[in-house]
Image (spheres, rainbow, N blue to C red):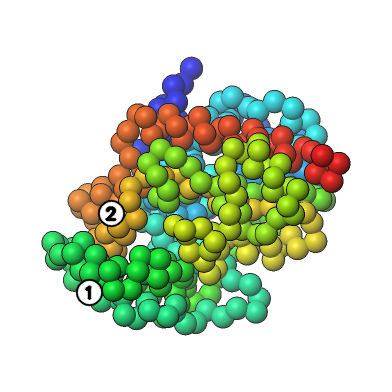
Amino acid sequence: MLSNEDYFSEDYVQARALFSRLAKMADVRLHGYEIPEKGPDEESLTTDIAWVGSPAAKKLLLVQSGVHGVEAFAGSAIQCNLLDYLPPNLDKLALVLVHVVNPWGMAWLRRVNSSNVDLNRNCLYPWEEYSGAPAGYAMLDSLINPASPPRKDLFALKTAYRVVRQGGAAIRRAAAQGQYEYPAGLFYGGSRLQREPAMLRQWLKAHVTGIDRLMVLDLHTGLGRFGEHLVIPAFAMDEKVRLITEMRFGRSLELGDSRGDGYPVTGSMSALYKNLFEDIDLQYFTVEFGTLPPLKILRALRDENRHHFYSDGHLDHWSKEALKRALYPASSVWKERVIENGRNLVENALWCLGRAFGNA
């Protein structure tokens, strides 16, 4: 029997092996697809998908991890716990676990894929273009994307000065909303749809058919207070549905751009699902497990990005470990809360999915 901490891995290879072993022990259907890139030891990189419950279900809960590769550790642990202790009452529902959407990013301890593309800024709607940057990003470029190896350079002091002059919310929006003009910069959304979301879309088109209701929980880390979690809907919700969902989740549900600590995101993965499942009842929630304050996370992202582009990019560099621990704290308390809150959230999502809200 595994303890809650045992569900957490320290690298991609360990995480994939644990997920695959628990899926086989649970005797659930296991799918997957491999990307061409390799890991640090030339290992294959695969997104594995476990299908739990009815293969003919009309209602499906999809839980995905690792859209931001280095953030995958928490989501992988939650998914492994779910495979070890399968949720009950899945005879008419399906639970699909998409394990590590961005395996290259997890293996190399990067938030992005091998092209430096943030996959959660890469999935545009048909009428949107891969061009432009938020107002203010150009002014921040030299601060957050310096063209030199990482070193001490008074980043905190310089950023504090910008916050005083421009405001923290304005800087968050400018930096993190998503940009398409600086290929070596942070939060780069790419110039076209990337391989990872394209392969996921292909799998969804082939296997998720005949459903009339889909709920997605997209697991991330970083935003929010340490040890707490946020649930952020991608789309506006009917008021009655929102109230019932808030009651079950135990969390206030506010769109990302309406939160005081949030910001709008261009090219979110939610658009991939919206484009594909436009004719069914779709709910999409980004789940954030809080770690460090935003400035410390930004600094870790900045240092690792500089190491990748302007140093040797090796995995054993201090900036890699710093980014990993910024988004995956080595804290037993944090890990316990992630498993407990993540599992409770999935079980309550299944409860919501199984109810007809119109008759609630």
Furthest-top residue in this view: 1
Q: Quadrant of residue 150?
A: bottom left
Residue 133 visible from this viewpoint: yes
Rendered location of residue 51, percent (x, y):
67, 39
Rendered location of residue 114, percent (x, y):
40, 63
How far is mark 2 from mark 1, CA to CA? 20 Å
Rendered location of residue 40, percent (x, y):
32, 51
> Within 10 angstroms of label 1, few (less than 14), some, or many (20 or more) residues?
some
Report the front residue among 176 and 59. Answer: 176
Drawn side of residue 148 relative to residue 295, left or right? left
Amino acid at pointer 1: Ala
Q: Quick check: 19 above or below 88? A: below
> Within 10 angstroms of label 2, few (less than 14), some, or many (20 or more) residues?
some
Label 2 residue SS: helix
Tell me the number on the disc at residue 147: 1
> Which residue is under mark 2?
296
- Residue occupying image coordinates x 53% and y 75%: 192
Residue 29 visible from this viewpoint: no
- Residue occupying image coordinates x 46% and y 21%: 2
Q: How many numbered badges does the structure rendering display? A: 2
Amino acid at pointer 2: Lys
Report the front residue among 260 and 220. Answer: 260
Rendered location of residue 278, percent (x, y):
75, 63
Q: Quadrant of the C terminus?
A: top right
The label nearer to you, 2 versus 1, is 2
Furthest-right residue in this view: 359
- Residue occupying image coordinates x 56% and y 32%: 343
Label 1 residue SS: loop
Report the front residue among 188 and 297. Answer: 297
Tell me the number on the disc at residue 345: none
